[in-house]
Image: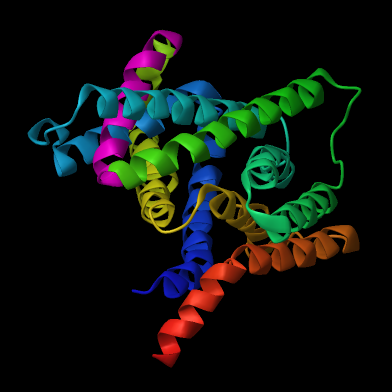
């Protein structure tokens, strides 16, 4: 597939990734009454690690110490991001948490993007995210304040996830690196959940719900993202993440009958425009493609 074809396909793959993530998030919210959000996030990563290790078998690869270290760092950042996000979702509405978390990718797009178009797209996406969230945070409650802080932490870790993830995705098979990353994240954060992780076995329904969350929120979407990361640059990947809060808005309206107010609809339009701008190849690449087509 050509470079321009991959850039055109990336938004559709992001929508598929976002849909599975939010379905998994819906199941995760149910689990919060049984175990802590951090424990749910840990099980999500751990089950994904078991699946990916059995599938990719990274020990059969001739990995360098540097590659293993980069994948391990990626795993610590990714798992921390998941924990922070679930802690935020436990305190804030899903759409608000997703929108606030997106500030991390916006920073990546603005500061690392090439040319004025990517920076303008980052600002447009930022405006859209603010409109979607609607500043829907109760600053007078401890839950609202702590939820805001957890979402900000998740956003910062999301920025690191993008920058590190793209590097390892292009260095070697992204899925092999992801298997090492999830295994590392599981081991590093196990002490945090050691007193609560057995709650996943409270009932068969609880266990299979945890398994479903792992597949829907980690195995499927992160595998898709590893493919996309090998196709496009980090700033464009960051901006395409703008599809996630927009997708959550649409899913809420269709599935949960939560119809957004006009500022959120305006934000959806802003985000859509930013995604279109992000999916446009740089001007010099357009010229090269045009010359190739002519020949």
In the image, is 68 to the left or to the right of 241? left
Assign the C terminus to one quadrant of the image: bottom left
Q: Indicate the position of residue 291 as horizontal and vertical percent values.
A: 47, 83
Q: Indicate the position of residue 236 as horizontal and vertical percent values.
A: 57, 55
Q: Is residue 52 above or below residue 274?
A: above
Assign the N terminus to one quadrant of the image: bottom left
Q: Quadrant of residue 180?
A: top left
Q: Is residue 52 visible to us here? A: yes
Magenta span main SS: helix
Work out whether residue 244 or residue 141 is closer to the camera in this orientation and state it.
Answer: 244
Q: Is residue 263 above or below residue 83?
A: below
Q: Quadrant of residue 202?
A: top left
Point 47% across, 73% down: residue = 4
Work out whether residue 237 or residue 153 is closer to the camera in this orientation and state it.
Answer: 237
Point 81% across, 18% down: residue = 142
Point 47% across, 26% down: residue = 77
The question of residue 209 being in magenta is answered with no
- Numbered range of the magenta stretch: 172-192
Q: Is residue 40 visible to us here? A: no
Q: Indicate the position of residue 205 as horizontal and vertical percent values.
A: 37, 38
Q: Is residue 211 above or below residue 18?
A: above
């Amino acid at each position: 597939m050509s470079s321009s074809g991959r850039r055109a396909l990336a938004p559709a793959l992001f929508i598929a990734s976002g849909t599975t993530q939010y379905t998994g998030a819906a199941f995760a919210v149910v689990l919060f009454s049984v175990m802590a959000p951090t424990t749910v996030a840990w099980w999500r990563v751990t089950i994904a690690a078991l699946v990916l290790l059995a599938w990719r078998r990274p020990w059969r690869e001739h990995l360098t110490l540097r590659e293993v270290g980069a994948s391990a760092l990626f795993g610590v950042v990714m798992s921390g991001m998941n924990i922070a996000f679930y802690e935020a979702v436990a305190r804030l509405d899903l759409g608000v948490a997703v929108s606030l978390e997106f500030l991390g990718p916006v920073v990546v797009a603005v500061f690392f993007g090439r040319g004025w178009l990517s920076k303008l797209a980052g600002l447009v996406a930022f405006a859209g995210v603010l409109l979607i969230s609607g500043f829907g945070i109760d600053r007078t409650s401890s839950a609202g304040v702590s939820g805001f802080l957890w979402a900000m932490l998740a956003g910062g870790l999301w920025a690191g996830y993008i920058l590190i993830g793209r590097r390892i995705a292009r260095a070697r098979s992204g899925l092999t690196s992801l298997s090492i990353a999830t295994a590392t994240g599981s081991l590093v954060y196990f002490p945090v959940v050691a007193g609560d992780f057995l709650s996943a076995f409270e009932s068969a329904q609880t266990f299979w719900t945890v398994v479903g969350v792992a597949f829907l929120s980690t195995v499927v979407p992160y595998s898709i993202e590893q493919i996309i990361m090998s196709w496009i640059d980090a700033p464009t990947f960051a901006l395409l993440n703008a599809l996630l809060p927009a997708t959550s808005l649409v899913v809420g309206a269709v599935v949960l009958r939560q119809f957004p107010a006009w500022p959120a609809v305006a934000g959806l339009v802003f985000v859509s425009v930013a995604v279109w701008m992000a999916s446009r190849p740089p001007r010099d690449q357009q010229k090269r493609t045009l010359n190739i087509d002519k020949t």
